[in-house]
């Protein structure tokens, strides 16, 4: 069969996500899950095309529909599946799968897929017929919309972390082609925002000793405990964070930077720094900001100044200590990121 697989929602031009968020973000989770589902479908002998809306392009959520529907309806697909997560009140939990009401094939797929996902430990809310969702009602192929779990429910989110992407992908892929899955093979690993298929053994390593700045367009950059996309996420860095690269590691998943005492980040989400670097601190009733700024300046051999509006990001790369909501870092966050 020829199958269209889509990721629900997108990141709009201004950086807003149209998806739900809780303990896990819906869009980021499904964007990471989708390549696994595609791989499982192909291992089962089917052709699968994956559609993800372009990021930072649309100005409103309705453009997601106009982007996806023509591709699906003109692609000659036999089946279509869109990936979603649920959110409600933090208490509701479980999985559910929607299909076009009255479509017996869709109903069969939804029922099997629900049981497959439930085998992973999620409450089975069942197959649900509808004629309201555009991905169900406005697509030519038999369409399914899966809500794998409630991302604002801690139990569901913890279970998703425990299950990992591989088992979830198998449950969905097998259900989509009307095969049962008992949840016993494959899986494991904490959820992460990168695709599968890699070999993390014996990375090539070289020394570095310079600074870069994270560039994630308003998103965060994951810091992992080992080289590769399967490493456990230890912490995150905000967009625009200045980091010191201790060493460089290369393997089949790309180039990774080792951050002193923190972990590894992918080089694709970092940019070089050409402007002089300085430390600016916000003055206040106490001298805590200055103390932190002085330590940062000393450890990184960078000049320290009190903020006076004469030194701006136009001329400098700035490590801020203190400040309001428009700053990258408060004093405490600055200490965490730079005192290493």
Image: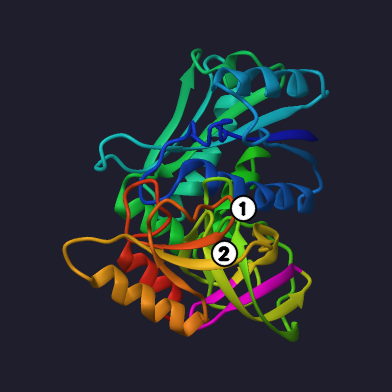
The residue that appears at 26% across and 42% down in the rendered structure is 90
Q: Residues within 10 Å of mark 1 (few under 14, many from 20)?
A: many
Q: Nearer the viewer, residue 140 or 327?
A: 327
**Residue 317 drawn in magenta:** no
In the rendered view, tell whether residue 187 sits above or below residue 29: below
Q: List x then y, in percent, for residue 124.
A: 39, 42
In the visual, does 301 lie left or right of 150? Answer: right
Q: Nearer the viewer, residue 184 or 254?
A: 254
**Residue 257 drawn in magenta:** yes
In the rendered view, tell whether residue 313 sits above or below residue 96: below
Quick one: SS at disc 2?
A: loop
Numbered badge on residue 170: 1
Disc 1, disc 2: CB below 8 Å?
A: yes
The answer to which image quadrant residue 263 occupies is: bottom right
Q: Is residue 5 visible?
A: yes
The residue that appears at 18% across and 67% down in the rendered structure is 286
**What residue is pinned by disc 2?**
187
Which region shows up in magenta?
Answer: 253-264
Quick one: SS at disc 1?
A: helix
Q: List x then y, in percent, for residue 119.
A: 46, 53
Q: List x then y, in percent, for residue 15.
A: 53, 37
Q: Is residue 183 visible?
A: no
In the visual, does 70 lie left or right of 291? Answer: right
- The Cα atoms of the two marked residues, 1 and 2, are separated by 9 Å
Q: Nearer the viewer, residue 305 or 119?
A: 305
Q: How many marks do you count on the picture?
A: 2
Work out which quarter of the rendered image holds the C terminus and state it. Answer: bottom left
């Amino acid at each position: 069969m020829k199958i269209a697989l889509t990721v629900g929602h997108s990141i709009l031009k201004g950086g807003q996500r149209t998806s739900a968020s809780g303990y896990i973000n819906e869009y980021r989770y499904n964007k990471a899950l989708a390549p696994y589902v595609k791989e499982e479908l192909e291992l089962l002998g089917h052709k699968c095309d994956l559609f993800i809306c372009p990021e930072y392009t649309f100005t409103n959520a309705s453009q997601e529909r106009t982007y996806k529907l023509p591709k699906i309806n003109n692609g000659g697909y036999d089946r279509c599946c869109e990936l979603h997560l649920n959110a409600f009140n933090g208490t509701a939990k479980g999985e559910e799968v929607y299909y076009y009401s009255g479509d017996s094939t869709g109903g069969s797929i939804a029922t099997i897929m629900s049981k497959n996902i439930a085998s992973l430990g999620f409450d089975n809310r069942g197959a649900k017929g509808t004629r309201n969702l555009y991905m169900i009602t406005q697509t030519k192929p038999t369409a399914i919309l899966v809500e794998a779990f409630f991302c604002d429910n801690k139990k569901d989110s913890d279970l998703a972390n425990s299950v990992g992407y591989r088992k979830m992908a198998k449950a969905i892929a097998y259900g989509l082609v009307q095969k049962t899955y008992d949840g016993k093979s494959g899986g494991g690993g904490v959820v992460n925002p990168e695709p599968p298929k890699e070999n993390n053994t014996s990375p090539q390593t070289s020394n570095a000793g310079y600074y870069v700045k994270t560039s994630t367009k308003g998103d965060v950059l994951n810091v992992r405990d080992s080289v590769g996309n399967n490493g456990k996420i230890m912490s995150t860095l905000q967009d625009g964070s200045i980091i010191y690269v201790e060493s460089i590691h290369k393997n089949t998943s790309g180039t990774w930077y080792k951050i002193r005492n923190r972990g590894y980040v992918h080089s694709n989400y970092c940019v070089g720094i050409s402007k002089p670097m300085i430390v600016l601190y916000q003055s206040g009733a106490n001298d805590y900001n200055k103390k932190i700024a002085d330590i940062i300046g000393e450890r990184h051999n960078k000049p320290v100044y009190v903020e006076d509006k004469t030194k701006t990001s136009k001329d400098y790369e700035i490590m801020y200590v203190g400040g309001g909501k428009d700053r990258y870092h408060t004093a405490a966050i600055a200490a965490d990121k730079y005192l290493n």
